[in-house]
Amino acid sequence: MADQKISELTALTALPATNDYFVLLDTSASATKKLAANYIYHDWATYTPTVTASSGTFTTVSAGNYYFTLHGKTRVLQGLVYIGTKGTADGTMYVTIPSGAAAAFFGGGWPVYGRCTTGAISAVLNVTESRIEILKYDNTTAIADGTTISYGVIYKLA
């Protein structure tokens, strides 16, 4: 490909593999520099979390996450949990996160946004336990038969 100014490009495409990069010309220093392709291109990955409760056991529960990592340190995660039959599960719902420990957020957990079938949730990413902890907005259990919970969090990797 011939040299082009970024402002003249209509599209910049790459499907980065390990160590793929774009070569950029720094005109102020008359030098070329490498920009990692995954710095500007991000592909969603999937992760199937483990869902448990602070007490009891679910009879049927399923979950899935999509996530990607920006610049090697910022993780963006979106997830969904469906409780078919709650069984004896009760209290706080715990949902594991993909590998890669989360850094502490000012000494604590990262705020998580989301909602469930019955309204808003109150949730946090517990960095010590590497899991998202979910309750309803009023700090009562969100665990009930036929409940769907969607959530998201942006956090820094340790």
Image (cartoon, helix red, strand yellow):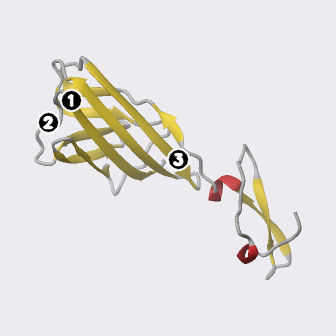
Residue 72, which numbered label?
Answer: none
Residue 26 rendering spot, x and y as whole percentages: 79, 75
SS class, disc 3: strand
| Residue 96 versus residue 157 in the image, above or below | above
Q: Determine which residue is flagged by label 2.
A: 141
Q: Residues within 10 Å of mark 3 (few under 14, many from 20)?
A: some
Amino acid type, residue under disc 2 in the picture = Thr
Residue 68, which numbered label?
Answer: 3
Seen at 29% across and 31% down, the residue is: 82
Choose the circle earlier in sequence order: 1 or 3.
3
Residue 143 rendering spot, x and y as whole percentages: 18, 31
Tell me whether the residue at label 1 lies in contact with that at label 2, contact meaning CB atoms closer than 8 angstroms: no
Seen at 43% across and 49% down, the residue is: 103
Place residue 151 in its image quadrant: top left
Distance of mark 1 from mark 3, alpha carbons?
Answer: 29 Å
Q: Determine which residue is flagged by label 1.
A: 146
